[in-house]
Amino acid sequence: MSPTRARSARKKEAATPAKPARPFIAHRLAPPHELLSEEETLRVLEELETVPERLPKILSSDPGLQTDPKFQAARDAGESFVGRLVRIRRPSATAGEAVAYRLVIASAGGS
């Protein structure tokens, strides 16, 4: 490439604006995640007769959480959701629907 072409290519690169962040689109295979309120979290823990530390964990930065509009609203409002539960509903051939719970923990980013 000649020096003239190289300079014009750099100018074109500098002139193009940065691409905006792509909006999150849930994949059809990702099960819906539902962020529970603090009251619902306490009620579910009582029903399960367990303590939060015994439940599987999920990072607050997990992409699956972005499938829930309540999670996005809480994040935009600056609300802390660490320590709350997430309900994950998966289709099941034997049970019809399998429900799993995860405890939200802070990610490395501190959300």
Image: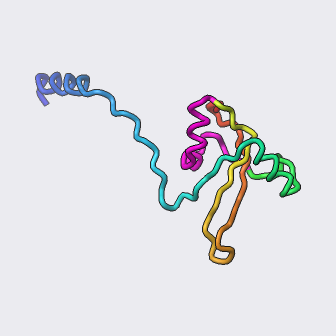
Q: Nearer the viewer, residue 24 or 3?
A: 24
Q: Is residue 94 left or right of residue 63?
A: right
Residue lying at the far front in this picture: please name it.
39
| Residue 31 part of the magenta-drawn span | no
Please identify the residue farthest to the bottom as the structure is shown.
Answer: 94
Q: Position of residue 94 (x, y in %)?
A: 67, 77
Picture residue at 64% right of the left edge, 61% below the top = 89
**Residue drawn 54% across the image and 58% down it:** 30
Q: Name the spot of residue 77 as percent of width and height, x first.
A: 59, 30
The magenta segment = 57-78
Quadrant of the snapshot with the C terminus: top right
- At 11% from the left and 22% from the top, the residue drawn is 4
Residue 52 screen position, x and y as percent = 82, 47
- Residue 22: name its quadrant: top left
Quadrant assignment, res 99: bottom right
The question of residue 69 being in magenta is answered with yes
How far across and down, in percent of the image, does residue 80 sit?
A: 68, 33
Q: Quadrant of the N terminus?
A: top left
Residue at 43% across, 42% down = 23
In this rendering, would 78 be left or right of 105?
left
Q: Nearest the camera: 32 or 107?
A: 32
Q: What's the coloring here?
A: rainbow
Residue 88 vertical position relative to residue 22 in the rendered view, above or below = below
Figure check: 7 above or below 28: above
